[in-house]
């Protein structure tokens, strides 16, 4: 199977080409945010409005991860994905503000699968247990918000050929459902 290439920020034309099960090499800018950062983003939206967010979410990609400390000379420490379902309570709101892609691991709720279709976005999974390999695709990393959260601070990453699999596409394709039914037939 041949990898597809995509650039973040993602536009509709790129997302339209992706189907559940496609392997993708993503290059460009992605942002990291985990539970604590999502809670802060949501509170900012409610209390101060979207213009006070630390980044514009329009067409952006959020990667659910917190890096380990980096050694001297490294851009970032090991940076594997965290369980995405923990962000489900915040996801609909962020998608409604233009978020186009999320990266993590594991299945999402039915509500989030429907929101991904509604807002014409995509959910990618990446490989757990290979955080050092994923770190090798990061060319630059800088904190953009919530530095006091330590490993859960929001980072801006510049990545090159970051390996992904399309789990949910904008048309309702579901990698997990496809794989489960495939194994049930055997």
Image (cartoon, rainbow, N blue to C red):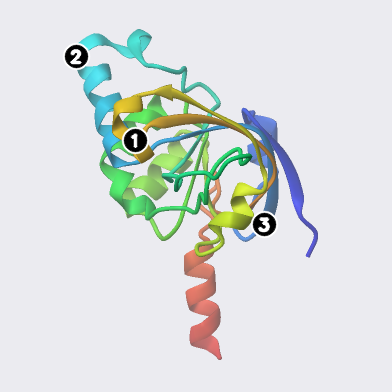
Which residue is denoted by mark 1 in the rendering? 150
Give the class, few, some or many, for how many residues have Cα within 10 Å of label 2's Cα (few <14, many ≥20): few
Distance from the alpha carbon under mark 3 to that under mark 2: 39 Å
> Can the viewer see residue 153 in this picture?
yes
- N-term-proximal mark, 3 vs 2: 3
Residue 163: x percent and y percent? 65, 52
Q: Which residue appears at 56% of the width and 91% of the height?
A: 186
Q: Which mark is residue 47?
A: 2
Foreground: 177 or 61? 61
Q: Is residue 142 above or below residue 170?
A: above
Give the class, few, some or many, for how many residues have Cα within 10 Å of label 1's Cα (few <14, many ≥20): few
- N-term-proximal mark, 2 vs 1: 2
Tag 3's secondary structure? loop
Give the class, few, some or many, for how many residues have Cα within 10 Å of label 3's Cα (few <14, many ≥20): many
Residue 118: x percent and y percent? 44, 37
Q: Which residue appears at 69% of the width and 32% of the height?
A: 13
Which residue is denoted by mark 3 in the rendering? 22
Q: Which residue appears at 37% of the width and 40% of the height?
A: 151
CB under 8 Å between discs 3 and 2: no
- N-term-proximal mark, 3 vs 1: 3
Residue 37 found in image quarter: top left
């Amino acid at each position: 199977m041949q990898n597809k290439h995509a650039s973040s920020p993602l536009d509709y034309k790129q997302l339209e080409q992706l189907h559940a099960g496609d392997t993708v090499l993503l290059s460009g800018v992605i942002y990291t945010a985990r539970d604590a950062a999502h809670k802060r983003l949501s509170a900012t939206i409610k209390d101060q409005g979207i213009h006070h967010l630390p980044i514009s979410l329009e067409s952006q990609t959020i990667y659910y991860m917190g890096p380990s400390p980096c050694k001297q000379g490294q851009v970032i420490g090991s940076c594997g994905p965290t369980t995405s379902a923990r962000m489900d309570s915040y996801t609909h709101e962020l998608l409604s503000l233009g978020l186009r892609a999320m990266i993590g691991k594991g299945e999402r709720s039915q509500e989030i699968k429907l929101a991904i279709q509604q807002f014409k976005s995509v959910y990618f999974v990446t490989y757990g247990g290979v955080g050092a390999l994923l770190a090798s695709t990061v060319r630059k990393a800088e904190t953009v918000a919530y530095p006091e959260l330590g490993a859960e601070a929001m980072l801006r990453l510049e990545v090159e050929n970051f390996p992904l699999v399309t789990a949910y596409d904008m048309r309702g394709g579901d990698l997990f459902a496809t794989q489960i039914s495939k194994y049930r037939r055997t």
